[in-house]
C-alpha cells in the first residue's frame, strides 16, 4: 500500500470514528468522552491534532494585518507633480510689467488710456481715471500692467506689443524675486502683437522655448502671469482646447483686424496676463497669452511661440527687429467673403486696397514681381495658406529670401517668384 493510500485509509477511519464518537457524546453530554472531543466549531487542524495527525491538516495563520489606506491613483500624483515641476522651471523667468505715465493736473477726471485704440484699451478693463483730489499734480502714475518672460540672461524680455504700445509711457519690470528694473522697448513687431524689452541685469533665469507646431488638442496648458495687473505669478492650468483659431478685434478707425492660427485654451487668462507664457508639462513655453473672450467661460488665446522665434533671433543678434516685406494689402478669404466677392477660391490672401493705400505698393517686391489687385495668394513655397495668415507666414521668412507664390488669377493658378525686402520694426 503506497503512502497516499495509507493516508486516505487513516483519514477515512478517523472520520468514521469521530462521527460515531460525536453521535454517542450527544446522548451523553456529561461523559468524559464528550468533554475530551474537539468542539464542532474548531478548526480542522485541532481535530487532526486530537488524532495526532497535524502533518496532514495544518491551518494557515490568521491574517491579523490591517489593510493600508488606499493612496491616490498614481497617475494623478504623477500628473500633479509634473505641473508643479513645470511651474518651478518657468516661474523664475516670468516677469510683471507696470505701465506708468506722467499725468498733468489738467488731466484729472479723464481716462489715462483714452488715447489708446479700442482693441488695446479692452485689456485694461474700464479704463484708468485720474483723480480730481489734488493728487494729480504731476509725476508718474501707474495706469496699467502686463506680463512677459525672460528670453536672455542679459535682460531681453518678450511680451505683447499692446502691453508696451504707448510711446509716452514708462515701463517697469518686476522679476519673480521682487527686484525692480526700468525697461526700454527695443522693438515692436509691425505685423504681430509682439515686442521685446531690455532691462539692465545679468545672470537672469531664462525660459525654454518649445515647439508650437507639435501641439495637440487636449494636452495640458499652464498660463502664468500678472493676473489683473495685481496678482503676480498667478498660475492657471487647463488644456489646449483649440488650434488654428481665428479671432477678430476692433482696430484703429473701427476697422476689424483678424489674427489667424492662434492657440485656444481654457487655462485662466485674465487682463494682466497679456504677454505671459503658456507652458506645456515639460516646462517649455509654447505660446504668448494675448486675449480672452469677455463674458465667456475660460476661453483665452495665445500666439504660438514659433511666431516669436524670428523676432527673438533678430533682436538677440543685432538689437533691432527686422521683418521681411512683400508690399501688399490683403484680406484673408473665407467661404462667405469669397461668395460675396464672387471669387472661385475660398481661401488665401485676397489682394485689395483699403483706406491706407493700394493693394500693391508701388516699387515694392510684390510690384516688381507682377502681383496685381484682385490676385489671391494660395500658397507660399508650396505651403497652403488655408487656415493661416499671410503676414504671419511671411514674418518667419528671412529678408532677401526668394519665395514662390501660388497665385489665383482669372480662373487659373500662376507661379510667381519674388525676393523679400526689409520692413523696419
Image (tube, rainbow, N blue to C red):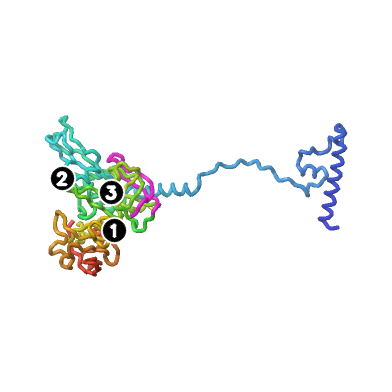
Residue denoted by label 2: 168
Q: CA distance from mark 2 to mark 1?
A: 34 Å
In the image, residue 239 sits, relative to residue 1, either above or below, namely above
- Report the side of 30 relative to 151 (left or right): right
Instruction: Give the label on residue 388, or none.
Output: 1
Q: CA distance from mark 1 to mark 3?
A: 18 Å
Residue located at (57% from left, 42% from top):
68
132 or 101, which is in the foreground? 132
Disc 1 and disc 3 in contact, CB within 8 angstroms:
no
- Report the side of 332 relative to 8 (left or right): left
Q: Farthest top residue?
A: 133
Which stretch did the figure color magenta? 217-243
Residue denoted by label 3: 290
Magenta part, dominant SS = strand
- Where residue 179 sits in the image (x, y, percent)? 27, 43
Closer to the chain start, of discs 1 and 3, is: 3
Amino acid at each position: 500500500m503506497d503512502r497516499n493510500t495509507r493516508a486516505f485509509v487513516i483519514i477515512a477511519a478517523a472520520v468514521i470514528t469521530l462521527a460515531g464518537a460525536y453521535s454517542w457524546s450527544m446522548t451523553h453530554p456529561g461523559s468524559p468522552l464528550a468533554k475530551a472531543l474537539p468542539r464542532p466549531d474548531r478548526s480542522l487542524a485541532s481535530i487532526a491534532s486530537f488524532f495526532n495527525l497535524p502533518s496532514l491538516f495544518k491551518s494557515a495563520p490568521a491574517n491579523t494585518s490591517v489593510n493600508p489606506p488606499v493612496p491616490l491613483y498614481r497617475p494623478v500624483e504623477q500628473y500633479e507633480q509634473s505641473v508643479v515641476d513645470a511651474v518651478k522651471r518657468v516661474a523664475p523667468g516670468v516677469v510683471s510689467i507696470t505701465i506708468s505715465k506722467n499725468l498733468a493736473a489738467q488731466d484729472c477726471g479723464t481716462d489715462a488710456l483714452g488715447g489708446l485704440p479700442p482693441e488695446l484699451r479692452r485689456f485694461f478693463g474700464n479704463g484708468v481715471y485720474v483723480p480730481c483730489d489734488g493728487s494729480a499734480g504731476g509725476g508718474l502714475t501707474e495706469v496699467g500692467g502686463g506680463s512677459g518672460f525672460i528670453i536672455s540672461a542679459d535682460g531681453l524680455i518678450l511680451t505683447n506689443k499692446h502691453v508696451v504700445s504707448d510711446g509716452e509711457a514708462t515701463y517697469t519690470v518686476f522679476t519673480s524675486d521682487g527686484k525692480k528694473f526700468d525697461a526700454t522697448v527695443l522693438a515692436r513687431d509691425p505685423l504681430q502683437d509682439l515686442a521685446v524689452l531690455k532691462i539692465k541685469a545679468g545672470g537672469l533665469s531664462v525660459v525654454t522655448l518649445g515647439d508650437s507646431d507639435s501641439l495637440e488638442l487636449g494636452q495640458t496648458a499652464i498660463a502664468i502671469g500678472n493676473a489683473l495687473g495685481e496678482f503676480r505669478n498667478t498660475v492657471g492650468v487647463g488644456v489646449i482646447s483649440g488650434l488654428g483659431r481665428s479671432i477678430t478685434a476692433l482696430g484703429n478707425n473701427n476697422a476689424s483686424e483678424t489674427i489667424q492660427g492662434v492657440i485656444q485654451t481654457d487655462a485662466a487668462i485674465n487682463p494682466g496676463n497679456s504677454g505671459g507664457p503658456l507652458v506645456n508639462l515639460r516646462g517649455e513655453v509654447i505660446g504668448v497669452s494675448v486675449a480672452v473672450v469677455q463674458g465667456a467661460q475660460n476661453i483665452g488665446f495665445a500666439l504660438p511661440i514659433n511666431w516669436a522665434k524670428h523676432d527673438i533671433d533678430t533682436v538677440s543678434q543685432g538689437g533691432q527687429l527686422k521683418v521681411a516685406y512683400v508690399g501688399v494689402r490683403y484680406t484673408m478669404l473665407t467661404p462667405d467673403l469669397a461668395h460675396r466677392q464672387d471669387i472661385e477660391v475660398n481661401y488665401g490672401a485676397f489682394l485689395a486696397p483699403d483706406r491706407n493705400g493700394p493693394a500693391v505698393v508701388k516699387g515694392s517686391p510684390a510690384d516688381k514681381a507682377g502681383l496685381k489687385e484682385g490676385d489671391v495668394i494660395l500658397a507660399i513655397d508650396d505651403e497652403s495658406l488655408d487656415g493661416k495668415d499671410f503676414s504671419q507666414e511671411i514674418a518667419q521668412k528671412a529678408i532677401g529670401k526668394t519665395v514662390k507664390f501660388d497665385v489665383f488669377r482669372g480662373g487659373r493658378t500662376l507661379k510667381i517668384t519674388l525676393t523679400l525686402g526689409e520692413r523696419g520694426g
